[in-house]
Image (cartoon, rainbow, N blue to C red):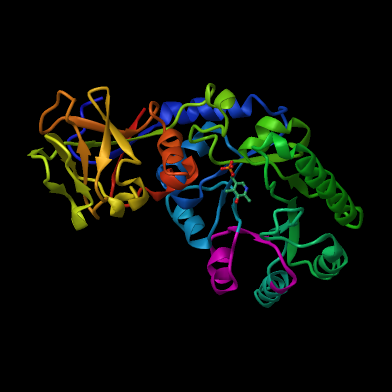
Amino acid sequence: MPKAQETVLEINLKALQQNFEHLKSKLLPNTKFLAVVKAFAYGSEACKIGNFLQDLGVDYFAVAYISEGIALRKSGVSLPILVLHPQKVNFKSLIEHELEPSLYNRKIIKEFIDLTTKEKITDFPIHIKFNTGLNRLGFSKSDVGFILEQVKNTKTVKVASVLSHLAASEDLNEKSFTLNQIETFKQIADSLTADLDYNPMRHICNTSGILNYPEAHFNMVRSGIGLYGFGNSEKENQFLTPVSTLKTVISQIHHIEKGESVGYNRGYISEGILKTATLPIGHADGIGRQYGNGVGFVTINGKRAHIIGNVCMDMIMVNITNIDCKEGDEVIVFGTNPSAETLAANANTISYELITSISQRVKRSYIK
Ligand SMILES: *Cc1c(COP(=O)(O)O)cnc(C)c1O
């Protein structure tokens, strides 16, 4: 790889392929694989990644919002796309782009069927989402009768799948809670399908569900973070490779005397002689202020350089007092080592937040 000459997020498509193959190897041959590409494919780049995964043979995609699904369609994705959190205001464009809504309460299912009826559509695929313990989105068990009434009363929609979402699939201390969610899901799905003359797919597992609950794969699994290289445990991380590496460069080096300050609000006051490097990456690029004042670090020529003072909008200053480096040298923010998970843990957050925060201003480049 040529050395970075500006801030860039390098995306390793080979690693993406290997992660996909590893996750796929955990499934029975007939279990479908849904790739979650919401939030710009967790900060990498949804359209490029979507088309790459489509060619690799995933079965389904999911996004959070309708606008994300439209972007995928416009880039050439033709596989089914599940929209996890649609809103009525965009239903017309959802239908127009053949996106499939996850419907989660009485209000939204009625609104959707009203529209499909008005538009005289037949068999539009819908997905019924149940709440089994996360208490975020989803119908409850007591809604089954209502749902059946709605869908059996119309030819405009067809239930393509029944789904739920696990609250703590990565936490083995919560195993009994998770097993209870899975059991509740089974019962609900059984009671819904008992009264339908066709059999919708069932799915409940996210990445950690795939890895920890093979008995709950049902007809399809939904993987996001695993595809991007994080297994939510040291054991699983061994088999996955982070797909993206965030790189930047040294713009300027400063020699700081004892008593001088560095950065806004004099966030750091030097206790001795110090060498700092200024880097063209800041909170507007996704390195939040919580990484400032020594919490976050970057790697320069193999050595850790901690952030000094406050994170600025477009820059950070790092401590390079004991590092042999010069202006123009490449800087690694995260990648395979240290991973985004390690850096995020320093700021008491998780890989998901750090990687999805890398803003659209940062250039993306791809390695095959
Ligand atoms: C984001 C999301 C996923 C993907 O979860 P990962 O832990 O990233 O694999 C799956 N299902 C739903 C409903 C989600 O919101």
In terms of image quadrants, where is residue 344? Answer: top left
Q: Is residue 335 above or below residue 114?
A: above
> In which quadrant will I find the N terminus?
top left
Q: Residue at x 9, y 40 (%)?
A: 256
Q: Position of residue 145 (x, y in %)?
A: 88, 66
Q: Is residue 272 visible?
A: yes
Please check the rendered image and state whether residue 90 is part of the magenta-colored stretch, yes or no: yes
Q: Which residues are magenta?
A: 85-107
In terms of image quadrants, where is residue 342? Answer: top left
Viewer-proximal residue, 101 or 347?
347
How many marks the image carries: the answer is 0
Q: Is residue 122 above or below residue 133?
A: below
Q: Is residue 46 visible?
A: no
Q: Position of residue 242 (x, y in %)?
A: 44, 31
Q: Is residue 268 above or below residue 325?
A: below
Q: Residue at x 69, y 29 (%)?
A: 27
Residue 234 relative to residue 243: left or right: right
Q: Residue at x 14, y 35 (%)?
A: 274
Q: Position of residue 221 (x, y in %)?
A: 67, 39
In terms of image quadrants, where is residue 159? Answer: bottom right
Viewer-proximal residue, 206 or 220?
206
Please check the rendered image and state whether residue 218 is part of the magenta-colored stretch, yes or no: no
Q: Position of residue 193 (x, y in %)?
A: 86, 53
> In which quadrant will I find the C terminus?
top left
